[in-house]
Image (tube, grey):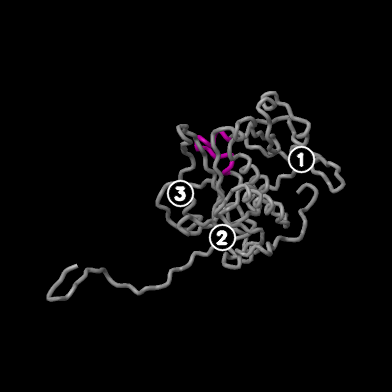
Amino acid sequence: MSQRKGKVFMAFGKANESVEGTPFKKYIGIAPVFVLAVNPTKVELEKLYNTTLEKDLEYIGISKQGDVEMPYAKVDFIVKTDPEKSNGIELATKVTFFLNKEWKYNKDKTKIQVINKYGESTWLSIEDAKNKTIPENLSWFDGEDFRPAYVGEEELTGFLKAYLNIPQKSYRDKKGVIHTLPNPSDAEARLENVENYFKGDFKELQGIPALMPNNKVKVMFGIKTTDDNKQYQAVYTKKFLKNVITDYSKIDEEMMKGKEAGANPTTEFLACDLKEYGVEATTFTAPGTATETEAKGWF
């Protein structure tokens, strides 16, 4: 700034017309999505999003937990809603999972989470896990072939089972009778090459979209609000629904249970069909869950 004969002169660039910023639309609710890619390269993601990215993509790294360094692997599923089943909404985003290169223990490390070949998870005492013993109260858990589960593996497996429409090995009908799948191998759903993920090898997962390109999985979308009051699109990653399911009560129950335990404190979720987020979306007096019950049988 300069001053000449009582006048003030300031240096500015070319003036431009002021316009309103384009608001970023955000959505809340549940919608079926297609999986377009798994951990794509920078070039592949630029093509999918029709944009240019500044940085290369990193899917492995080292995190610090105190003085302990922990290798981790990130798994990004690039997904896109089916607008015909999502109130005309076209939303492309990602569902992200983080896996740590460590077994999952409870807080006092008296129990360890285990997973069997059917993708079923449970908690066992350290002694039972070492001895391959299944307590009577866990008779539902097939103990023929199980191993410790990695941190994050349960959630990733749940997503894949829902997306690939993997049947349950058995189910209990309304009369309490247990029915078993004629061919139990159809229900197998365990990741066998997790160790490779921490080396950057995700081939086990990357071939999945081409295997079932028309499959869809139902995902719960929400809105996360930061400390500085900025809002971002979020995805609930603790539970997913098979495309055939229209009853949202189970995922709603799981989400609310987590909220009560302190999970996702700054993120809003709503168990309803996907809609644009606004003032009306924060009214929880009418959750709007579907009334149909979950399909029975092997789904």
User: Which sits in the foreground, 98 or 126?
Assistant: 126
**Which residue occupies 64% across, 66% down?**
87
Q: Earlier in the sequence, mark 3 or mark 2?
A: 3
Residue 262 appears at what percent x and percent y?
59, 48
Residue beneath disc 1: 169
CA separation in Å, label 3 and label 2: 20 Å
Q: Are marks 2 and 1 in contact (CB under 8 Å)?
A: no
Magenta region, residue range: 194-206
The residue under label 2 is 91
Query: Which residue is at a point 47% across and 38% down the rendered structure image?
Result: 63
Residue contact at pointers 3 and 2, CB within 8 angstroms: no
At a point 68% along the width and 31% down the height, the residue shown is 124
Hey, what amino acid is under mark 1? Lys
Q: Name the residue under label 3.
A: 42
**Residue 157 drawn in magenta:** no
Q: Residues within 10 Å of mark 1 (few under 14, many from 20)?
A: many
Q: What element carries label 2?
A: loop
Whether 198 is among the magenta residues is: yes
